[in-house]
Amino acid sequence: MRATHPGRRLSAGLLAAALVAGCRLHHVQHDPAPPVAVADRWAAATPGAAALPDRWWQAFADPGLDRLVEDVLAGNLQLRAAWARVRQARSLVAQADAARLPQLELTAGAQRSRQRFEIVEGMVLTPTTNAFQVSLGAAYEVDLWRRVGSTRAAAALDALAVRDDAEALAMTLTAELAEAWFDVVATRAQAEVLAEQQRIGDTYLELMRLRFTQGSASALEIYQQEQQVLTTRAQREQADGALRTAGARVAVLRGRD
């Protein structure tokens, strides 16, 4: 009887263990719980807080803001691209669903041939032969290892994530638009006040000059009023520039030139 070397027995044992480990199924945890608990609605997480409506900007009762938000939701280029990605993700889900159905393949073909036979001299036959072929094949993949089901579940989760991204972008854009719109309203009101102050300052300067010609005002008073008029004019120009900037920001958010 021939003895077996201990090293060979050890190598054979390691090889067997590796084969057994390689044949073990990988454990997949479906729908794992998030590591941190997240509330369904942020308002509900605060005691006594009322849930915010979906169209929260209507609470301001500003028709101009309502029209602008509708324009942003319909015409913003980033948001349109995000919703296009949502449609693409849903198409991938439909494609994954189709992989779970039997696959049918129908093929059809037709062939016509003509032969020429000369029976006797001067007598020729040309018979025509038509051949038609139709075949139907069916294939179905048994999802034994849940490859198809896992692919479909992954596509569905990707679609949900892409939709959440699009909704988050919509909320961000509407919030930025509301901020920009109120900047426009506040800056416009400030510009109107400065325009009125400039008109009053110009009128008062003319009256001051008239009083100076009559000896009722000094040159210092005229100089001080001129400086006040120039300051108001500079503030108005700054307000006009800020108004144009805020309007441009609104136009960019709307996706308009």
Image (cartoon, rainbow, N blue to C red):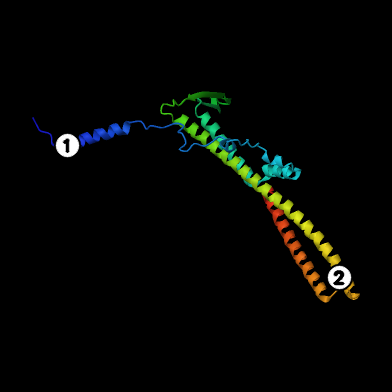
- Relative depth, front residue between 55 and 52: 52
* Marking on residue 232: none
Point out residue 50 in the picture as x, y percentages from the top left corner. 63, 35
* Marking on residue 8: 1
Residue 130 horizontal side relative to residue 229, left or right: left
Q: Amino acid at mark 1?
A: Arg
- Relative depth, front residue between 50 and 112: 50
- Distance from disc 1 to disc 2, alpha carbons, whole Å, reads 115 Å
Q: Is residue 35 above or below residue 199?
A: above
Residue 174 horizontal side relative to residue 4, left or right: right
Please tell me how crowded label 2 is: few (under 14), some (14-19), or many (20+) other residues with Cα within 10 Å: many
Q: Residue at x 43, y 29 (%)?
A: 146
Residue 195 visible in the picture = yes
Q: Nearer the viewer, mark 1 or mark 2?
A: 2
Residue 230 horizontal side relative to residue 108, left or right: right
* Marking on residue 208: 2
Query: If you read the primary sequence from the N terminus, does the residue marked by circle 1 or circle 2 appear first?
Result: 1
- Relative depth, front residue between 105 and 58: 58
Examine the image and state in which quarter residue 92 appears: top right
Q: Is residue 246 above or below residue 8?
A: below
Report helix, strand or loop for mark 1.
helix
Residue 256 visible in the picture = no
Residue 191 horizontal side relative to residue 177, left or right: right
Point out residue 188 in the picture as x, y percentages from the top left corner. 75, 54
Q: Is residue 225 above or below residue 49?
A: below
Q: Residue at x 49, y 32 (%)?
A: 153
Give the quarter of the figure containing the N terminus: top left
